[in-house]
Amino acid sequence: MRKLLFKSLVTLPLTERGPDADDEALAALAGRLDAAVRKRLGRSLAIRMVDAGSCNGCELEIHALNNAFHDLERFGFHFVASPRHADVLLVTGPVTRNMREALERSYAATPDPKWVVAVGACALDGGIFAGGKGVAGGVGGVVPVDLHIPGCPPPPKALLGGLLALMQQQTR
Amino acid sequence: MTTTLADLFPPQSRRWARRVISAEQWLGLADRLESGAFTLVAHWAEPPLVHVALRDAAGSTGIFSVEAVDGRFPSLGGASRPARRLERTIRDLTGLEPEGAPDLRPWLDHGRDERGAARPYAFLPVDGEGLHQIAVGPVHAGIIEPGHFRFTAAGETIVRLEQRLGYVHKGLEGLMAGAPLERGARLAARACGDSTVAYSLAFAQAVEAACGVVVPPRAVALRAVMAEFERLANHLGDIGGICNDAAFSLMLTHCAILRERILRTCALLFGHRLMMDGVVPGGVSCDLAGAGEAALARLFKRIDNMLPALFALYEDTASLQDRTVRTGIVLYSLAKEFGAGGPVGRASGRPFDARRDVPYAPYDSMAFEVPVLERGDVDARVRLRFREAEQSAALLRRLLAALPAGPLRAEVPAREGEGAALVEGFRGDIFAWVRLAGDGRLAHAHLRDPSWFQWPLLEAAIEGAIVADFPLCNKSFNCAYAGHDL
């Protein structure tokens, strides 16, 4: 273990420069966030992830946000274990009938002010699973969505760009 | 009573030949499942037919069908425990009643309509003094899929774990029935996103078996390249995740770096980090990008450096092994009874790997070792993944060094027929079955995730452990939710 740790001391960090905030995402958010709210939260956002019916593809890429290359926490984002600790719900998947209530309850348990970011093609309108017998529909049909990050699944860079847009809009 | 499948099919039958049998003969199968002569591979329905796919000790495979009469069919669940959740699913999805089934509670169907609350669910009763229950999920604390775990504990010791799944049930089979082949392939690729290559491969092989398509050699090799990259990346994710659940985050950090490097190389080579939709019926959808050679050489150098270093890190950290050794033991007898595949089965001494035991190209012409361990604990499942990761890296090298030239895709004719395939994903063997309508559409498709036969073993493995060991144990299984919930 010592060898690995020493090696980490002398090698350069792997962390890459973050992408610029996604302009489209920024435009989508314009006007949604109140100035007072921005001031109160500063530059720290707690994220609770809710899989409402995804195939697990989006989860893998959300996981990748935490690796050394992307290092999400340097931007002030961190994942929390409960919606009660969260500012942002990151929701993936088409919402299934069996997850609808759990998503509604997660949203209700998240204190105000709060934002919902829908992740992936399915989260928009059910995507390829739209019309499935167990599918209730897109995330927006169940809880109000502030930002949608497209992709199947969205690569970590796209996720970062979207989240940074949310943050910038908030602190502007 | 015959105990080999070969006796039940005409000689020279193809691998997954299907026979319609009488209810009486069907019950004969139940006896052979109970005695362990046959292993259950899949069990699904296409009303009015109910199918069961089996494998015998000699490695022969076959599918049997029985016709449901008045919406009822004889249950196999009394004799075969792995059949039980599958029969509950058949009942949920098709309404066919498994007659004589020991458990008739709904499984994937939670009884919710468009808006409504769920039907109450009867968890199994637990009796005893001083017991308490802990309900976890469907929304878990980590970045993972949803499911519900109901623990009954005496103090810190788990007396019973009961799982409740189906939260991400989308109605995949319903969406696939009647879909054009191309859409069917895209749906199969999204049945379980972490195994997208393996699912696409299983689906494609089933379609190819149904209409007699021969896949060009270059496509066969590229499919295996994608499949091994997927296995390697996922095993690294699992090793890191397991160690992290024992609070050893250094391993996760380094595994995640290597995993990210692999995904980036895959994006460079195939245009998608997870290689989604890379495997299609008839072949592959893209060739290796030319620019990838230097990146590949760099990647292999890093893998060669890091894998032994990470294994040494595991090996030398006694505090970590203190958590993993003798935790969450899966007995060989259970692994065999449930036909559990993948690292869960192989870490408990069940030496099954579809690449070798129900061989398909290109593995049928490649010699490789299938690592098997006996102890069946979390430690064995970690070690097995290390060995398999090394093996995948070696296979990748061989495949890439000898890539045949030629076309990437054979045409898939619009033909009527049915076909099945068993493909080894990183979790274990994925079964796919399709019936083609003849107009280029699917009449029916069924995909069976390896987790069906692993989830129940997690319930057994955790009994008597402390609650704090559950995340560790669960991660060492890493069963699928999406693939299971359909």
Image (cartoon, rainbow, N blue to C red):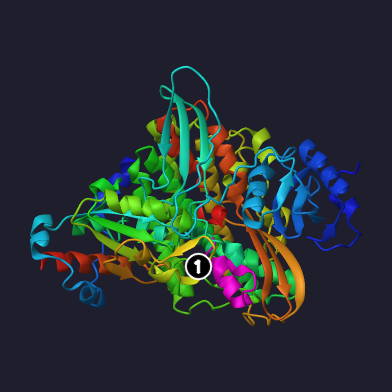
Q: Residue sitting at 44 percent across and 27 percent down? A: B466
User: Looking at this rendering, what residue extends furthest in the top direction?
Assistant: B129
Q: Is residue B397 visible?
A: no
Crowding at mark 1 (Cα within 10 Å: few <14, some 14-19, many 20+) = many
Q: Which secondary structure is most common in the magenta stretch?
A: helix
Is the N terminus of chain B in the top left, top right, bottom left or bottom right quadrant? top right
Is the C terminus of chain B in the top left, top right, bottom left or bottom right quadrant? bottom right
Q: Is residue B437 visible?
A: yes
**In-image side of B41 versus A100 (left or right):** right
The magenta stretch spans residue B16: no
Residue type of the residue flagged with mark 1: Phe
Q: Is residue A34 placed above or below B103 in the rendered structure?
A: below
Q: Is residue B319 placed above or below B148 in the rendered structure?
A: above
Residue placed under numbered mark 1 in the picture = A129
Residue B322 screen position, x and y as percent: 42, 29
Task: Write the start and end of the magenta stretch as one range.
Answer: B175-191
Q: Element type at marker 1? A: helix
Residue B177 screen position, x and y as percent: 64, 69
Q: Is residue B203 placed above or below B374 in the rendered structure?
A: below
